Amino acid sequence: MESIEEIKRKYKDEWVLVEVLEEDEKGEPTKVKLIAHSRNRDDTYKAMKQAKGYVYHFWTGKIPAKGYAVAFILE
């Protein structure tokens, strides 16, 4: 079991898929179990199709400021 903050530090600038094990009173995940991580979002989408239970999918990098666009290159 890990926290979201631990996962973000470990897998910086990656897409992450986790199973939610515990939530706070607002329904935010507090304890999770890593399922998959990758710089390529499609890898975590593939894992999501096979995941069971309650999952949470997120990007650990910085979100661009308003007014900027982002392009992802798939290799």
Image (cartoon, grey):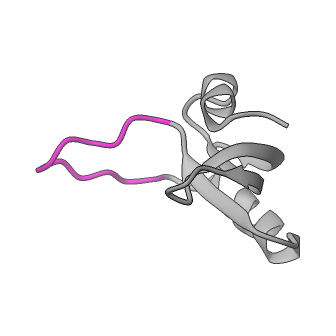
- Judged from this view, the residue extending furthest toward the front is 25
- Could you say where residue 6 lies in the image, as x and y percent from the top left? 67, 26
Position of 16 relative to 12 (above/below): below
- Could you say where residue 27 lies in the image, as x and y percent from the top left? 56, 60
State the residue at coordinates (83%, 71%). Answer: 53
State the residue at coordinates (88%, 73%). Answer: 52
- Judged from this view, the residue extending furthest toward the left is 67
- Judged from this view, the residue extending furthest toward the top is 9
Give the total number of marks visible in the rendering.
Answer: 0
Q: Was residue 1 drawn as part of the magenta stretch in this picture? A: no
Q: What secondary structure is the magenta-colored segment mainly?
A: loop
The stretch in magenta equals 61-72
Closer to the camera in the image, 10 or 22: 22
State the residue at coordinates (62%, 58%). Answer: 57
Closer to the camera in the image, 57 or 14: 57
State the residue at coordinates (53%, 38%). Answer: 60
Question: In this image, 53 relative to 69: left or right?
Answer: right
Position of 46 relative to 30 (above/below): below
